Image (spheres, rainbow, N blue to C red):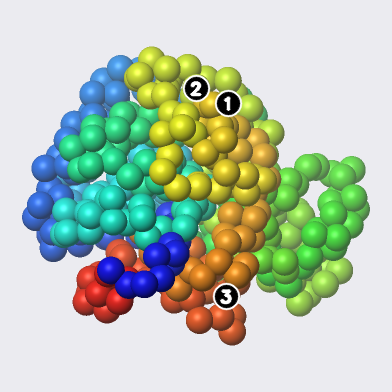
Amino acid sequence: MSQDRSPRIFIQFAGQGMKYMDELRRLYRMNPDIQPFIHDAAAIIQRELALYDDAETDFFSQGIDVIRWIESPEQTPDAAYLLSSPLSHPLIYLCQIATYISVIQEGLDPEWLMAHTHSATGFSTGILAAVLAGMGLPLPALKEMALKVQAMFFWQGVRCQQSMARFGIRLDLDPARLDIGDGSPSCMASINNINRQQLDDFNRVFSDYGIVHPAYELLPDRWIVAGLPENLIAFSHVIRARDPEIGWKFIPSTIAAHCPFLDYALETSPIDARRIGLSLSGSQLKIPVWSNDTGANLGNSTDIVQDVMQAYFIHPAFWRKQIAPLTGLNGITHVLDFGPGAGVASLTESHLTDMQTQVIRCTIPLGRRKLFDEILPVLN
């Protein structure tokens, strides 16, 4: 063991990833030991799906057959379907928690990890995966708790989409436009080259037409906004007419998260969690886990499920608050990113310009080799 025992690792999880099925498929094929857990998680999803009457909503028009989609890529639905809330909530969580579990299976001891980790967080819905990591559970207990959370995420995706349906929104993303121009019109968008004051000023100008909510501060000059698609389209025209330097890109989301549009989900999802038997408190955490909205330590929470749902569903979030330890003098040398996707890893790197802290993408073979061959020997 090195002389310096201060924790040097920070753990983070993403909350979105357009190609999460590709990532899950790669994980499944390259890490055979994770396959039984993925099968168990897929069975949990099917169990909960059987309890949901989709006759009116038609959220699952193409089913949610994870194993078939992994083994037969040509039978996988298009990205627009996979990115709808009822699909993306449970499957993005599955991708990220399976990635984390697979690293533990490869030999990363949870007790060692907790001893060397300063704290953790998760972007948006990724916060619950961070909570599971922060519990430092042995592998069997981790899998058991992860499957409970898997069931919860099925219902969370449904409740979020039901929330939007109450506003008359049944959004079908256009797969042909997801990567072109401004993207497919949706319930959320990323805006570059704009600070909070400018965003508030534009909102005042736009207030007679509709409401656009500042949902997530990514960087001081980069925000995610949320609202009804027609309002976001109109808002984009307003800001570009006044400042053509401002960049706009729709995020492929069928829900408006981190704002009051999801108040119905906040009413119903905690009930789903209690029915499933999911209950988490801060006393179960072995390291601090920083919340989406205020950056507070969830170790002080008496009801983590309620608190993280409130932060995700209706409160604006601030990434700089979530990763504040990285920009302080805490001796953190490495960030372990468990995805999915590279977006949040890149976002954190943008906050760490001119700093020595490295972001390690544990979702790709190169990142895993770096973790096991370079980082762990130095910290041991």
Q: Position of residue 279 (x, y in %)?
A: 42, 24
Q: What amino acid is found at the position of numbered circle 1 in the picture?
A: Leu
Q: Where is residue 256 in the image (x, y as percent from the top left)?
A: 61, 42
Per the image, the residue denoted by label 1 is: 266
Q: Is residue 37 above or below residue 7?
A: above
Most foreground residue, 114 or 78: 114
Per the image, the residue denoted by label 3 is: 352
Neighbours of disc 2 within 10 Å: few (<14), some (14-19), many (20+): many
Seen at 41% across and 43% down, the residue is 286
In space, the residues marked 3 and 1 are separated at their CA atoms by 34 Å
Q: Are marks 1 and 2 in contact (CB under 8 Å)?
A: yes
Q: Where is residue 53 in the image (x, y as percent from the top left)?
A: 35, 17
Per the image, the residue denoted by label 2 is: 270
Q: Are marks 3 and 1 in contact (CB under 8 Å)?
A: no
Badge nearest the viewer, 3 or 1: 3
Q: Is mark 3 on a helix, strand or loop?
A: loop
Q: What amino acid is found at the position of numbered circle 2 in the picture?
A: Pro
